[in-house]
Amino acid sequence: MPGIRSARSAKKAIIGGLTMSKQDTAVFDDLLREQREFPPTRAFAAGANARDRSLYDRADKDLLAYWADQASELSWAKPWSKVLQWEPPHARWFVGAKFNMAANCLDRHLAGPRRNKAAIIWESEAGEVRTLTYLQLHREVCKFANVLKELGVAKGDRVAIYLPMVPEAAIAMLACARIGAIHNVVFGGFSPEALSERINDSEAKVLITADGGWRRGNVIPLKENSDRAIESCPSIRHVVIVRNLPGEHHLLHVVEGRDHWWHRLMDRRSADCAPAEVDAEDPIYILYTSGTTGKPKGIVHAAGGYAVGCYATCKYVFDLRDDDIFWCTADIGWVTGHSYVVYGPLLAGATILMYEGAPDYPDKERWWDIVERHRVSILYTAPTAIRTCMKWGADLPAKHDLSSLRLLGSVGEPINPEAWMWYQENVGGGRCPVVDTWWQTETGSIMISGLPGVSTMKPGFAGQALPGIKAIILDEQGKEVKEGSGFLALTHPWPSMLRTIWGDDERYVKTYFSKWDNKTYFAGDGAKKDDKGNYMLLGRIDDVLNVAGHRIGTMEIESALVSHPAVAESAVVGKSHDVKGQAVVAFVTLKTGLKFDDSMKDTLKKHVVDKIGALARPEDILFASELPKTRSGKIMRRLLRDIAEGRALGDVTTLADPAVVQALREDYEEHYGG
Ligand code: WTA
């Protein structure tokens, strides 16, 4: 498909910036012309939860009534007195209502036929399979909720969770929700230092971890990392350790009185634990995400509204039904893992597939083998994973019976049309709709996506704003952009929106509600729209990178680099990468007298991994005798990006010393062989 391929490389050129030249705009137009369209099939639409545009009409007519309808399908311990109380830039949803997330995910299903249905089917990397029915999951959650209470966790307290993809991760989250405690899940790939920063910011009382996690047959030493992390975490009183490694776990360092084995605490614990009465607006969790400063932001979600967003999107975007086996491949440490591994699917009463390990272990067919054996019907993954599978070859999925699949989803970064087509043809067998879902940690649930039984899908476009969501493209001044690219914004509150940044409401206001007015949410993404209101996302327009679907701030990596004694200054930029979307490239200047060589490069890469985690490891580190700066002293990242991408240099008129750029560029060309 040559058309798609050329469109893909063209698309790459427009990602990552709003400085679109005429040539770029022409590229977009080409994409539109070449575009293949995929209207919903009659077979899919016939059985879908959303079959026509009536949902959009309903939401357009009365947005609050639409959300109230969605909310009323969940159970509330006390009804709301008001659907929305909007005091810009703050919004409160379902005001006055009482709501328990765990009761909605579990208890609500126990009275009917879902009682003995699988809630979680878990497969370990080694191939062990564990199934928990709704009734069993309810039991485990109640028991662990009692454990937490005994450890002194009360409503509103924070609990840090640093676990691999094991059922205990979901159990721990739901147990927190059951007693109204606020969980703070930290991705298992983060370093001890990153974990400690997140624990301290949230002042968590308890840390739940495991003896280890598995990745390609190797052990990730989570307990050792935890021990190092909490050396500087005075708030932690107890550590609960899930046993996930065979045999030698007795060798683990266990601190008497502080550290407890999960299975011992659970032993003979009562499974009787009434759900706490939680206010709809009480925080359900804090999840840290990268921003434009070195310090990650603790995004706070509120129980009631967040649940409504997750539930409605599972119902309409994923068309979740009772016989579905839903597999979202995201890790529990990211928002996608929160909303679409745990909460959304359980609210919808679906069966979740959870896989602990790597996609290429023991071989590159593992995913397809899982889909075949467990009869997965909906697969939700990231473009970077799809591109990796493309590289591995279409013959691998072709060897497996993937006929159980009926719907495919993508999230985390723009999906290039070539990957979209590959996914649709080679995984979806040409029969499954593909939903490209745009959303963020801050939005809590999907904001922009096609509905599989209603929308005509276009590769490269995420689709329209969902019913109940008001999106717009604005220019710098806040004027609507009808043609061309601009900033994506949301103009009306939505139930699953973030409520604040933990401990820093000022940063919340400044980051999200002050670019234009205090009613308009600034998403940080560039976008463009076609004449039918389908959005094409153009990537971040701030200093946030998206590496293999993981958000990471350039400032975080820069702080890590300058914390090394050899580094005087550093600037980090993203470079397009065929598989990961973006890769990290760091420019560093060293302290006087130090030599930059391969060993220094390796040392600095390792330093970043130690400070943040492997996800932030620079693909390359480039030495710079000086960094290009404006006359006011600001590092000119745009120029560095141009250099990293090997593009013609952009405007250098504001540069303090233009010779710096030329020198840098020569270094770089020499380094990469031109
Ligand atoms: C990007 C992940 C294009 C975007 C759920 C956003 C996307 C950031 C898409 C949020 C998509 C996510 N198309 N870009 N379908 N989905 N993004 O907070 O830049 O980890 O701002 O949430 O990912 O990343 P986060």
Image: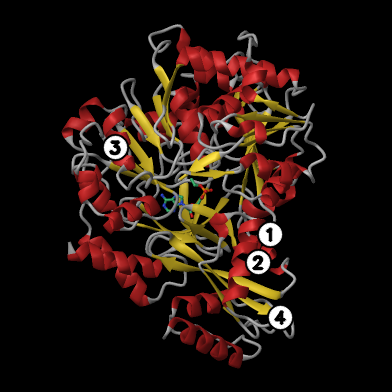
Q: Nearer the viewer, mark 4 or mark 3?
A: 3
Image coords of residue 373 (percent x, y): 28, 30
Identify the residue at image location x=42%, y=44%: 358
Whether residue 178 is visible, yes or no, is no
User: Can you tell which mark lies on residue 294?
Assistant: 1
Near mark 1 (Cα within 10 A), the count class, few <14, some 14-19 or many ≥20, is some
- The span from disc 3 to disc 1 (Cα, nearest Å) is 41 Å
- The span from disc 1 to disc 4 (Cα, nearest Å) is 21 Å
Q: Are marks 2 and 3 in contact (CB under 8 Å)?
A: no
Q: Are marks 2 and 1 in contact (CB under 8 Å)?
A: yes
* Residue beneath disc 4: 632
In front: 242, or 429? 242
Q: Amino acid at mark 4?
A: Ser
Q: Secondary structure at mark 3?
A: helix
Colour setup of the view = secondary structure
Q: Are marks 1 and 4 in contact (CB under 8 Å)?
A: no
Q: Amino acid at mark 3?
A: Asp
Near mark 3 (Cα within 10 A), the count class, few <14, some 14-19 or many ≥20, is some
- The span from disc 4 to disc 2 (Cα, nearest Å) is 20 Å
Q: Amino acid at mark 1?
A: Gly
Q: Is residue 616 above or below residue 505?
A: below
Identify the residue at image location x=49%, y=32%: 309
